[in-house]
Image: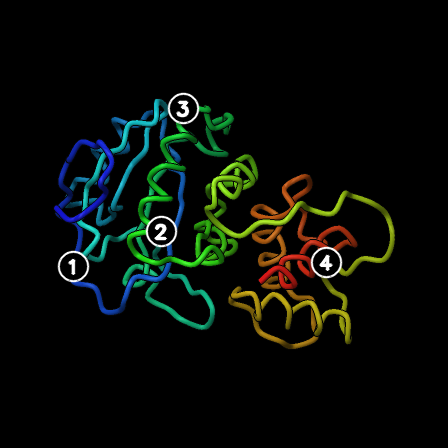
Amino acid sequence: MIGTTLPHVVQASPNFNDRRADISILLLHYTGMRDAAAACDWLCRVESEVSCHYLVDADGVITQMVGEDKRAWHAGLSSWAGLEDINSRSIGIEIHNPGHALGYPDFPARQMTGVAALSSDICKRNAILPRHVLAHSDVAPGRKIDPGEKFEWRALHAQGIGHWVSPEPLSGGTFIQLGDAGDSALALQSLLKFYGYGIDISGNFDDRTKLVVEAFQRHFRPARVDGVADVSTIATLHKLLRAL
């Protein structure tokens, strides 16, 4: 199987097909299951109709299931930067964590070490840009919330992986929220769309806008995930765009 140069084990999944686009995205997920063995088993069952390229367990052990040259089935209905079929454009890593429905524990240090090594290897070999190292929630706001607000994007960035700035601290001040409309909402939607999120620029802070703001917060301003575009959220978005 074509894949990582790092030590890993192979458990082949039958759930893949041919890519329809070049690789440009690294997409990170959590498994949302009680243990990594069960997740690995499910991702390799024909009836599941899901798969990923790699699974990283709590100890940082890497299992490859699909070759990087093939289209694994991990992203589902999703988009980024105006492009769809994220499965064809991405390499998917499932990171074992029970997820929000099962207590959502912290990601262990050994696991993050494995994720960082694997991500770095993938990005270097496939020339994936930092801004295209994404969460499942980034490409499917509302439908998916993984790997969630506890995932340590800052730690990955410190090792040269992904796009990150220090979030602006929580504070008071003017905010935009569900039901608001006007130039402020229009500007916010425009900035989120420019960064890559799938959002319509309508000037109305609708349900979709709230979900996209929540996805942005989970990744880039995890101190509070509420879908309210407060001063901290907007300032963090501006910092990210300036850093591109």
- In percent of width and height, residue 22 lies at 27, 66
Residue drawn at 42 percent across, 65 percent down: 79
Q: Secondary structure at mark 2?
A: helix
The residue nearer to you, when weighing 31 against 107, is: 107
Please name the amino acid that badge 3 sits on: Arg
Position of residue 201 relative to residue 3, above or below, is: below
Compare marks 1 and 3 and give the one earlier in the sequence. Answer: 1
Amino acid marked by disc 4? Ile
Q: Quadrant of residue 201?
A: bottom right
Q: Position of residue 240 (x, y in %)?
A: 63, 58
Q: Which of the labelled discs sits on residue 123, or is there none? A: 2
Q: Say whether marks 2 and 1 touch (CB < 8 Å).
A: no
Q: Earlier in the sequence, mark 2 or mark 1?
A: 1
Instruction: Write down the residue under mark 3.
Output: 110
Q: Find disc 4 in the rendering and name its residue.
A: 234
Mark toward the viewer: 1 or 3? 3
Could you say which is closer to the camera, residue 16 or residue 89? 89
Nearest to viewer (mark 2 / mark 3): 2
Residue that label 1 marks: 17
Looking at the rendered image, the disc whose residue lies closer to the viewer, 2 or 1, is 2
Residue at mark 2 to residue at mark 3: CA–CA distance:
20 Å
Left or right: 6 as drawn, with respect to 241: left
Q: CA distance from mark 1 to mark 4?
A: 40 Å
Give the residue displayed 69% in from the left and 72% down from the top. Answer: 204
Secondary structure type for disc 3:
helix
Q: Classify 10 Å Cα crowding around label 3: few (below 14), some (14-19), many (20 and above).
A: some
What is the secondary structure assignment of the residue under circle 4?
helix
The disc, 4 or 2, on the residue closer to the chain's N-terminal end is 2
In the image, 173 versus 99, the foreground residue is 173
Q: Position of residue 214 (x, y in %)?
A: 61, 51
Q: Mark 4 to mark 2: distance in Å?
A: 28 Å
